[in-house]
Every structure is written in structure tokens, then in C-alpha cells.
Image: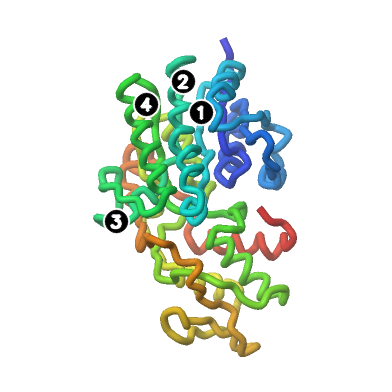
């Protein structure tokens, strides 16, 4: 009988995969991380956290059932954390079929493989606040109606309910964390928080002139990825499989996020104009450093996301260690100290 828990993390090269790997290694797990074969995978996050050589990297593809089954049989995982996804919302509008195949059917391939190979394997599905979309109530809890507003959100609703269905139909330990927006220095450059922290830091040091943003009024519930992967592991090690909202319980607009970054970087600035003409002026240079570009608006906007983490706080005693202010300070400090490192 093996004494060390074996964890398989799909999407290990992403922000969450890197932080989760670090946490599980610290807890004594033997960690396997998947990288899609044929892709030019970037291991820079794992290298930055000094854990790449502590993870068993394996070829894996959620589109290929035989590959999934082969890997599960070979490594015999105790836990599978499915973090792999086509996770960028704008791309999901451009590639809805691929997004659905990876995010939806990929989960079914994993769940069905567990049923057919070893029903004792625990399964965690990375669900998302984007499933709430056009929200019907605020804050959003585990029982709030789902109304996704993007192919990404729709694909995640499918996989969320399939996880529940397999749990109830096959008596699997299959659980979901409905994670609201979570950021970190390891966030991909295409996401708005990274775009803001990286762009404004470059403007401050003179290597960039301006950043272009979309809807400044969109409200989001932001937390730190390091806190949220702890929630994943707590959900997976609960005494029963269940689904939990993971969030800060507060909401801020994109404009609020920009303001906090500008103040952290000690800009002397002013907002001018309205609507699409709204800009931020750097008073020192009298030049615009933030502009609005309509191309960054979503075809169907999600106006507000704010989670209710009451259940996970009460049942699992989970508490975030970071605030939005401390998160922003950490992200900006990273950009200042690592100007040439991009994820």
C-alpha cells in the first residue's frame, strides 16, 4: 500500500496549477502535472516558484480519451484536479467549438475514465463565477440560478452539472469549486488585471505610453490565487463531495482596480471625459495613460459578479489571507522586480 498521496493536476502550467502544485508538494503529495503534447508549453510559472523539478510532467490531452485512460492507469492517482481549460472568455467567442470540446467533453472523458478504471479516485472540477453571467441575485451562492453569457461560461455550466451527475449517478467523490476572479503575479498577460498592473508599471518606468481597456464599470469579486488553491484542497479533502463558492464576498469595478494601481504606483493623475471618451491623464506629462477601446467590450457583458463564501467559511473554515489591496501591491512589486518576465 502506498503511503504518499498521488495527485494529477491538469493545466499545471497555468496560474492555479502552479500554486496548487506548490501547496501539494508542501503537503507531501507526489504531483503529476499535465502538458498538452505538441504545444509549446511554458513552464516559467513552475520555474519561478522553484518547483518544476519536483513535478512529474506528462503528455496529456483532454481531447484524447485513450491518452486520458492510459495516464490514469499508469500513475494511479488518488486525486485528480481538473484545472485545464480554454479559460479566456474573449477567445471562447472566437473558438466556441474548441472551447466546448476541451471544457465540457474533456470533463466527461475524465469522469467516465474514473468510473471505468477506479471509482475511488477523488475528482475536483474547476467551476467558475462566469456560470452566473447575467446574475439573478447578488451575492451569488451555490444555489443561485446559472445564466452564462459566453461560450466559456456555457461550457463550464455543462461540466459543472456533469460533475454533479456523475457524483449522484456513480457515487463518485466528485466536487466543484465555483471560483470567482482570482489573480496573482503569475496571471497571464491577456487578463485585465495583469494588463493593468503590468501596463501601468511600464508607463511609470517610461517603457510604455498607454493602456487600452474595455468596460470600466464591470464589477468583479477579486481574490488571490494562492488562497483559492488552498480552498481547492480543502474541498477535495472534505468528509463528503460537495460544491462550494470560493470568493472574497466583495466587489469592485475595473475602474476601482485601476485607481488602486495608480495610487500604489504614486501617479499624479486625473480622470477626464465620459463613456468611450473617458481617459486617465498623467498630470506630470499631461498625456493620456489609460484609454477606452470598444474592441475590448464583450459581445454579451457580465455586469457584476460577487460571491457569497458563507458555506465554505462555515463548513470548511476557509479564510482568504489576502485583501485586494495586498494583492495589487504584490502584483505591482512583481512587475517592478521582474520587468522582462511574462507569463
Residue 224 x, y percent position in the rendering: 51, 52
Instruction: Please name the residue that numbered disc 3 is placed on.
Output: 135
Mark 4 or mark 2: which comes first in sequence? Answer: 2
Marker disc for residue 114:
2
Does 328 sit above or below residue 242? Answer: below
337 or 111: nearer the eye?
Answer: 111
Query: Is there a contact, CB below 8 Å, between mark 1 and mark 2?
Result: yes
Mark 4 or mark 3: which comes first in sequence? Answer: 3
Instruction: Please name the residue that numbered disc 4 is placed on.
Output: 239
Q: Is residue 32 left or right of residue 226?
A: right
Tally the numbered discs.
4
The residues bearing labels 4 and 2 have C-alpha atoms spaced at a distance of: 19 Å
Instruction: Please name the residue that numbered disc 1 is placed on.
Output: 80
Could you say whether the residue bearing mark 1 is in a helix, strand or loop? strand
Foreground mark, 4 or 2, reads 2
Query: Is there a contact, CB below 8 Å, between mark 3 and mark 2?
Result: no
Pointer 3: residues within 10 angstroms few (<14), some, or many (20+)?
many
Amino acid at each position: 500500500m502506498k503511503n504518499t498521496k498521488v495527485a494529477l493536476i491538469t493545466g499545471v502550467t497555468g496560474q492555479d496549477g502552479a500554486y496548487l502544485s506548490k501547496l501539494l508538494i508542501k503537503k507531501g503529495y507526489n504531483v503529476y502535472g499535465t502538458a498538452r503534447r505538441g504545444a509549446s508549453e511554458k513552464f516559467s510559472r513552475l520555474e519561478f516558484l522553484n518547483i518544476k523539478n519536483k513535478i512529474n510532467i506528462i503528455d496529456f490531452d483532454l481531447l484524447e480519451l485513450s491518452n486520458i485512460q492510459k495516464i490514469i492507469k499508469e500513475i494511479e492517482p488518488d486525486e485528480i484536479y481538473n484545472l485545464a481549460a480554454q479559460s479566456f472568455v474573449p477567445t471562447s467567442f472566437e473558438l466556441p467549438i474548441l472551447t466546448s470540446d476541451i471544457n465540457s467533453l474533456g470533463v466527461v472523458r475524465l469522469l467516465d475514465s474514473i468510473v471505468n478504471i477506479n471509482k475511488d479516485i477523488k475528482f475536483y472540477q474547476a467551476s467558475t463565477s462566469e456560470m452566473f453571467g447575467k446574475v439573478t441575485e447578488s451575492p451569488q451562492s451555490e444555489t443561485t440560478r446559472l445564466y452564462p453569457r459566453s461560450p466559456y461560461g456555457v461550457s463550464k455550466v455543462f461540466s459543472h452539472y456533469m460533475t454533479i451527475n456523475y457524483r449522484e449517478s456513480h457515487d463518485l467523490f466528485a466536487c466543484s469549486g465555483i471560483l470567482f476572479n482570482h489573480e496573482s503575479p503569475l496571471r497571464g498577460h491577456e487578463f485585465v488585471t495583469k494588463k493593468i498592473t503590468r501596463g501601468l508599471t511600464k508607463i511609470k518606468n517610461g517603457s510604455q505610453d498607454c493602456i487600452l481597456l474595455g468596460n470600466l464599470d464591470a464589477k468583479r469579486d477579486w481574490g488571490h490565487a494562492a488562497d483559492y488553491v488552498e480552498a481547492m484542497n480543502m474541498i477535495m479533502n472534505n468528509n463528503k463531495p460537495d460544491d462550494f463558492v470560493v470568493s472574497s464576498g466583495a466587489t469592485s469595478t475595473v475602474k476601482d482596480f485601476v485607481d488602486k494601481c495608480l495610487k500604489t504606483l504614486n501617479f499624479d493623475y486625473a480622470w477626464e471625459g465620459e463613456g468611450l471618451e473617458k481617459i486617465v491623464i498623467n498630470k506630470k506629462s499631461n498625456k493620456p495613460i489609460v484609454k477606452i477601446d470598444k474592441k475590448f467590450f464583450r459581445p454579451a457583458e457580465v455586469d457584476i459578479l460577487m460571491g457569497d463564501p458563507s458555506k465554505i467559511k462555515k463548513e470548511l473554515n476557509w479564510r482568504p489571507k489576502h485583501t485586494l489591496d495586498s494583492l495589487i501591491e504584490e502584483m505591482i512589486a512583481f512587475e517592478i522586480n521582474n520587468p522582462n518576465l511574462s507569463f
